Image: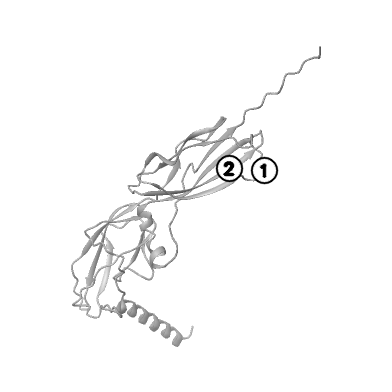
Amino acid sequence: MKKMNFFKIAFTLVLAISFSVAFGQAKDANLTEDQTVDMVMTVGTEVPFYVAPDAYFNPGYVGPGWTITSSFLWSFAVDPASFSFDAVNTATTIAPDITIGTAGSYVLNVVETSTDGCAGTTRSVNVDVLDAPTADFSVGDVEQCGDYTAAVLVDIADNTATLFEVDYTLVVQNYLADKVTVDGAVISTTPITDVALGTPGAAQTLIASATYGVLNTKVTRYTFTIDGVNDAVSRVSDYIPSIRDGAAANTLYASLTDDTFIVTVLPSPTTGPIFHLAN
């Protein structure tokens, strides 16, 4: 690389860094809670934070320019095992995006420093990071003669969140008597979204009691599959893709273990007539 080109690139980088500090950004109106309220987020999600700059030291912090002259340093009282600041909104801006890859409770700090090098008051907020939600079927597969009538239950892992929603799909198919070979086309495929489950725990009702019957007098299999689950915290943690970026985002977390529940109902044979020698 020519020496002149190197200095041009270096100078451009300096300008870019200077402008990123000088111009700052306006507060996102959706960020309404202050440091007196804990932030609760899902592990591994990118969540925005914001600190209000001192108006005296940043008189240009008004629209449309939102000029920032102070510097801001964000840090954890004790670093999580895994965390990162977004490459654009770094730990030296008023509004970083933070990802924490380890569940737990942390304290996030920020301090403003003026251009004279005077550090201000350190502000802190508690950040509670929850594991991603999971849902599994409560019982093992069922096989029985004749119709099966029961509720379909799921276990919701308690990650201390609430307002769980589960998506599932029900596929209905006939099989030959060997119970292995598919007999004909799929009878139905029914995807169901956003089944609301209020609290975590075992044996939550995914589907109220219903009857799953023998169809076409053939072995009939009902296969329920959990497509994913989310909760109030994970939906809030979808903030950046769904609200800021304008992209559809309602992250579904897959079941980790038993994500299918299969009900196989068996037809009973029709006993034929008895034959004997003619008199």
Q: Residues within 10 Å of mark 1 (few under 14, many from 20)?
A: few
Residue at point 55%, 41% (across, down): 223
For residue 169, which numbered disc appears in the image? Answer: none
* Amino acid type at image mark 2: Val
Task: Residue at the far bottom: name it.
Answer: 4
Badge 1 amino acid: Gly
Query: From the viewer's perspective, is 157 left or right of 141?
Result: left
Q: Judge by depth and name the residue closer to the eye, 163 or 140.
A: 163
Up-down relation of residue 218 to residue 255 (above or below)? above
| Mark 2 → mark 1, Cα distance in angstroms | 11 Å
Q: Secondary structure at mark 1?
A: loop
x, y percent for residue 27: 29, 71
Mark carried by residue 172 = 2
Is residue 98 visible to us here? yes
In this rendering, the answer to whether 194 lies above or below 210 is below
Q: Nearer the viewer, residue 5 or 265?
A: 265
Q: Where is residue 100? Give x, y as percent.
A: 35, 58
**Quarter containing the C terminus:** top right
Identity of the residue drawn at 23% across and 72% down: 53
In screen coordinates, is 177 left or right of 57?
A: right
Element marked by disc 2? strand
Residue that protrudes farthest toward the top in the picture = 279
On the image, numbered disc 1 is attached to which residue?
184
